[in-house]
Amino acid sequence: MLTVDPDKRITLGQLWSHPWVRGATRWEPVGASVYCVLSDPSTGAVYADEQLVDELEASGYPRQMVLQSLLASEVNYLTAAYYLLAEGEWVPG
């Protein structure tokens, strides 16, 4: 992996199956940005700030539409409201 000679280096496929890589925990920056909405690829669950989604839902924004818009990285009134609320720039209602 750390060989200077490119002909002797392992391939990308071999790298991904190497014990160092396979045994490592997945790194994800926590709270790096309010614009970072993660999802679980196996279940499709959206990891948005539940308190923000609850506030939007209480103000009449459909919860499922908010989550779908965040997951699809759409630019619309739902994501704008979520991100403005996340930044503390907007108060619903």
Image (cartoon, rainbow, N blue to C red):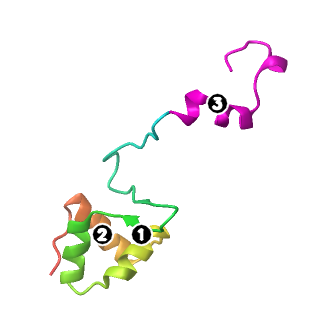
Q: Which mark is residue 70?
A: 1
Against 92, is 88 above or below?
above
Which span of residues is magenta-colored? 1-23
Query: Would you identify the image quadrant in which residue 86 lies?
Result: bottom left
Residue 77 is situated, as x and y percent measured from the top left of the image, at 36, 78
At 76% from the left and 31% from the top, the residue drawn is 11
Q: Horizontally, is 62 left or right of 21 in the view?
A: left
Labels 2 and 3 touching (C-beta < 8 A): no
Which callout, 2 or 3, points to the residue nearer the camera? 3
Give the number of the disc on residue 10. none
Label 1 CA crowd tier, 10 Å (few <14, some 14–19, many 20+): many
Q: What distance separates the C-alpha of mark 2 from that of mark 3? A: 40 Å
Q: CA distance from mark 1 to mark 3?
A: 34 Å
Do tag 1 and tag 2 residues touch (Cβ < 8 Å)? yes
Residue at image mark 3: 18
Please tell me which residue is depicted at 39% across the width and 81% down the height of the picture: 65
Q: Residue at x 19, y 83 (%)?
A: 59
Residue 82 numbered tag: 2
